[in-house]
Amino acid sequence: MKILSAFFKRFQIFLAIFLTIASVTTIFLPRFKERSILLEKNAELQAKITLLEKEIQDLHKRKIAFQNNPIHLEKLARDKLGYSKQNEIIYKFD
């Protein structure tokens, strides 16, 4: 009887440990998956932020070039907008 009682006691301890591990896994496993998904998304967004910051720097350099370099501004106006100087004839070839 003592052997059977000791067996049931060990079985109860094993069952309690197993149920505890199973419930903890059930509760926290989805959160670990969600965390890994969020970490991946965070890495993607950080890369996008880096690209956008580089683009902002490039646009800032172009802005300064327009403000400080009238030759650059004139070239842009001629090429993109088709402006010309007074008494100047522009020929366009297709």
Image (tube, rainbow, N blue to C red):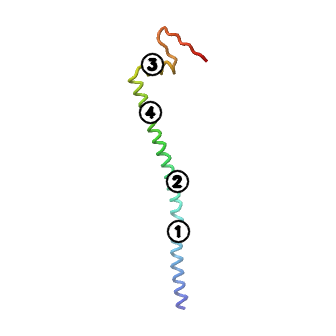
Q: SS for tag 3?
A: helix
Q: Residue at x 43, y 28 (%)?
A: 62
Q: Closer to the camera, 90 or 30?
A: 90
Please tell me the numbered disc located at residue 37. Answer: 2
**Residue receiving disc 4:** 58
Q: SS for tag 4?
A: helix
Q: Residue at x 39, y 24 (%)?
A: 67
Q: Position of residue 79 (x, y in %)?
A: 51, 20
User: Callout 3: few (<14), some (14-19), or many (20+) C-alpha neighbours within 10 Å?
Assistant: some
Dots 4, 3 in contact, CB < 8 A: no
Which residue lies most toward the front here? 93
User: Callout 1: few (<14), some (14-19), or many (20+) C-alpha neighbours within 10 Å?
Assistant: few
Dots 2, 1 in contact, CB < 8 A: no
Please tell me the numbered disc located at residue 77. Answer: none
Q: Is residue 58 above or below residue 8?
A: above
Marks 4/2: CA–CA distance: 32 Å
The type of residue carrying mark 4 is Asp
Q: Marks 3 and 2: which is nearer the front?
A: 3
Give whichever of discs 1 and 4 has the lower sequence position: 1
The type of residue carrying mark 2 is Ile
Q: SS for tag 2?
A: helix
**Residue receiving disc 3:** 74
